Amino acid sequence: MSLIYVTRAMQDDIPAIGAIFEQAKAFLKASGSPQWQAGYPNTDTVAQDLANYSAWVLKVNDQVAGYAAAIIGDDPNYQEIDGAWQNNTEPYAAIHRLALSQDYRGQHLAKYFMSSLISILNEQGIHNFRVDTHDLNQPMQHVATSNGFIRRGHINILDEPNDPLRWAFELNL
């Protein structure tokens, strides 16, 4: 039986997270998605997440198996939506950069990771969550909807040079 848990990322986790990002970029490219094909995310992104105390890892038997950033506060990318947010008044956490090591794909760990982050943040008083992903990123859309997120419309990622259109999802507890 494996020990599986979510914890804050640490500086020592950055190399493993960087490798996970490279695997995720290759996976997205192979599936035809332009998402994450312009250098983002990278280890500098993780360092910034660590500094902002928003970096989380999924560990399996004490090995980094996944990464996500949970950022509490207004996300400029979510200011304009072709659709509507259900809750536009309470604080929300945007969950970004969720990626798993290729060694753990197909084990439903992304769903577990997302659910765990929602639980942790709910205990901190956050009850509104948002995620976004490219139309061609079916695995992430499945993770969102299987965790109760509702598709609210399209947004445009402000610093995405290739294909900025993303589906935006929201969960309100």
Image (cartoon, rainbow, N blue to C red):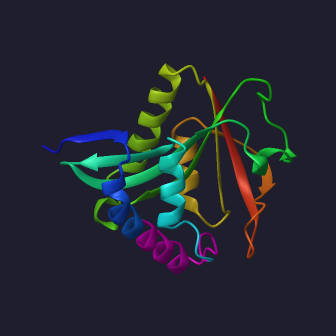
Quadrant where the N terminus is found in the figure: top left
Name the spot of residue 170 as percent of width and height, x first: 67, 37
Horizontal placement of 140 versus 92: left or right?
left
Task: Confirm whether the magenta stretch covers residue 88.
Answer: no
Quadrant where the C terminus is found in the figure: top right
Quadrant housing residue 148? top right
Horizontal placement of 74 versus 81: left or right?
left
Task: Confirm whether the magenta stretch covers residue 36.
Answer: yes
Q: Residue furthest front?
A: 51
Q: Residue at x 63, y 67 (%)?
A: 136
Name the spot of residue 102 as percent of width and height, x first: 34, 67
In the image, residue 160 sits, relative to residue 66, either above or below, namely below
In the image, residue 142 sits, relative to residue 135, either above or below, namely above
Name the spot of residue 41 as percent of width and height, x first: 55, 65
**Foreground of the two, 160 or 154:** 160
Q: Residue at x 45, y 58 (%)?
A: 99
Q: From this viewpoint, is residue 101 visible?
A: no
Horizontal placement of 140 versus 115: left or right?
right
Q: From this viewpoint, is residue 167 visible?
A: yes
Q: Residue furthest left?
A: 1
**Foreground of the two, 77 or 12:** 12
State which region is magenta. Answer: 21-37
Q: Residue at x 79, y 24 (%)?
A: 89
Horizontal placement of 161 versus 111: left or right?
right
Q: Residue at x 51, y 47 (%)?
A: 51
**Foreground of the two, 142 or 158:** 158
